[in-house]
Image: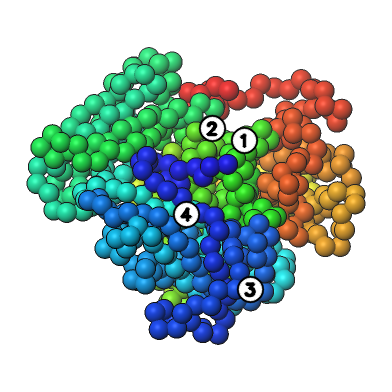
Amino acid sequence: MADAYPRPQLVRPNWTSLNGKWQFTFDNEQRYDLPMRPVQWTSEILVPFPPESQTSGIGDRGFHLACWYQREFDCMPGDDRVLLHFGAVDYKATVWVNGHRVAIHEGGHSPFSADITSALDPSGKQTVTVHAEDDPHDLAKPRGKQDWQLEAHSIWYPRTTGIWQTVWIERVPKTYIHKLQWTPHFEGFEIGCAVFVHGDPEDNLSVEVEIRHGDKVLAYDLYKVIGNEAHRKIGLSDPGIDDSRNELLWSPERPTLLDARITLRRDGQVLDEVTSYTAMRSVAISRDRFMLNGRPYHLRLVLDQGYWEDTLMTAPDDDALKRDVELAKEMGFNGVRKHQKIEDPRYLYWADKLGLMVWEEMPSAYRFTAKAITRMVHEWTEVIERDYSHPCIVVWVPFNESWGVPNLMSTQSHRNAVEALYHLTRTLDTTRPVIGNDGWEAAATDIIGIHDYDADPEKIKARYSDKTQELFDRRRPGGRILTLDGYPHRGQPIMLTEFGGIAFVKPQQNEGNTWGYSVANEQKQFATKYRKLLEVVNTTVMFSGFCYTQFTDTFQEANGLLYADRTPKFPIEQIHAATKSARYGFDGHPVPAEKDGDQAELAGNAE
């Protein structure tokens, strides 16, 4: 299968994937230091799969401080520029082309690029070398679910070292479109368009923007570039009539995307041209409800770790990313919470295209230091910049369960960190809600997220009856209070953002190597437990949404609705019905239930 274009919202035709076989070696003793001490290569690796994965050809999950990569590629110098892009390298990357250092980047989940034009060899034969430092014991860096013990334990999984997303080159003009940013303005039926230009200083630059819905042109205009940027609100013709208006709105039930073409000109001459897409949709909080396109919308999310058995955090291919989006929808969910992982942009593309909302969550560090917070701020800023324009992303989550800020109740600096990241996120993106710290001990936040793995549906029902003040005065699971002193509940939406975690394994599987928050011993029991739990959560008035744990089994965690190979643990139409609290008998025949989808109709997008 050919590599899919890795940056789906800024597309050019002239690009080349550098995925494939590279030379590789670990370097735990720091033996090599280009250009003084050349690297001795010991093996080959299949990029972009990390060396801990079986698919990479290495399959080594031991402790390694650093590793080296190298490959040759063909690229003739010309009158244009050549950019080298890395989707993600964990954790600190140094890159050389033909022995010339072209980039240093820190942050294991965010992309970086280098203009390698001046480093190209005139012969057209080029060599790229990458050094990746990734101390497996460093708990002060954002690492998400990557284990610091030799063997994966509890809720942590095998490490990911080095290159784990696509590497690619593209040719661009000397002056080119570097970045696009799309901002829907639902109230005025406008699309904000920001175009950022890099390259040689140029006068008389302009950008031409065309937005289409199918064959219909919605907007076509020309804007002057001032200071290497052009910012405009583009008014779309508001049909006025709800049915016609709703055809242009994005939602999980009707994921309408608007195609865009952006052309950079100088005195009318075309310098650069890219294609992109955007969408008209709004997400907001109104009192105790999450709002989509100005109407209350009930969130049905599933927690997704984003791992595969043989490839770890890297998807096997683009079809696997697409299939995960399809499976979430087939199980009745309208969104996912990507847990402790910044997912590949191709996943976000499929979520945009197929209609699946995404909560994006920053991978945690597990030690509170000034360096840890500095690293997190830097990387989170890059992540928001990368993913800002994706309509599927509806909530940002900087912290989870006080990880990295363990003393929120007693230490002001820990509180300051959560508040700072909350306000930084709201500053960088004014259009989406932010959960400062999901699970408990909330301070600055737009949504109160609660994590509660009680396996008894009746206890869940009783605990979250409509007695809000009593709820916030009591302590929750784990001995944690829901809101910190000085941050009373201000009427924000309350959501059960982790619950369930019911473990069920195949009969032939060794149950001693797996675990969950509760256990089902056979398929029918598992299906019944899930259905009863979801009935309670779906009908609890206090909740404006939920996130069930979890999407798939993930290594030792056997609490997925799907096995690790993505096959369902009971018929997927029954999972779908239970998720939405419709009813199916265990034989698969539907039992009449009340009409579902009223919230989708309110949002202007009936299923």
Q: Which secondary structure lies at badge 3?
A: loop
C-beta proximity under 8 Å, tags 4 and 2 = no
- Sequence-wise, the earlier of marks 4 and 1 is 4
Residue 326 marker: 1
**Residue 541 drawn at (x, y percent):** 62, 38
Going from the N terminus, do you reach mark 4 or mark 2 first?
4
Q: Which residue is mark 2?
A: 354
- Label 3 is placed on what type of residue? Trp
Residue type pointed to by label 1 = Glu
Label 4 crowd bin: few (<14), some (14–19), many (20+), radius 10 Å: many
Q: Amino acid at mark 2?
A: Leu
Gap between marks 1 and 3, in whole Å? 33 Å
Q: Position of residue 5 (x, y in %)?
A: 45, 43
Left or right, 200 with reference to 415: left
Circles 4 and 1 in contact, beta carbons < 8 Å: no
**Is residue 248 visible to us here?**
yes
Rendering quarter of residue 225: top left
Whether residue 270 is situated above or below residue 179 in the rendered picture: above
On the image, numbered disc 3 is attached to which residue?
A: 148
Give the camera-side residue of 490 and 128. Answer: 128
Density class for disc 2 (Cα within 10 Å; few <14, some 14-19, many ≥20) is many
Residue lying at the far front of the rendered structure: 123
At 40% across and 84% down in the image, what residue appears?
Answer: 36
Residue 47, given in percent of the width and then of the height, sits at 55, 58
* Residue receiving disc 4: 18
Residue 513's spot in the image, x, y percent? Answer: 82, 62
**Amino acid under label 4?**
Leu
Residue at the (15%, 36%) spot, across then down:
269
Please give left or right for residue 211 compared with residue 574 in the image: left
Between tags 4 and 2, which lies in front? 4
Kindly indicate whether the residue at mark 2 contacts the one at mark 1 (C-beta within 8 angstroms): yes
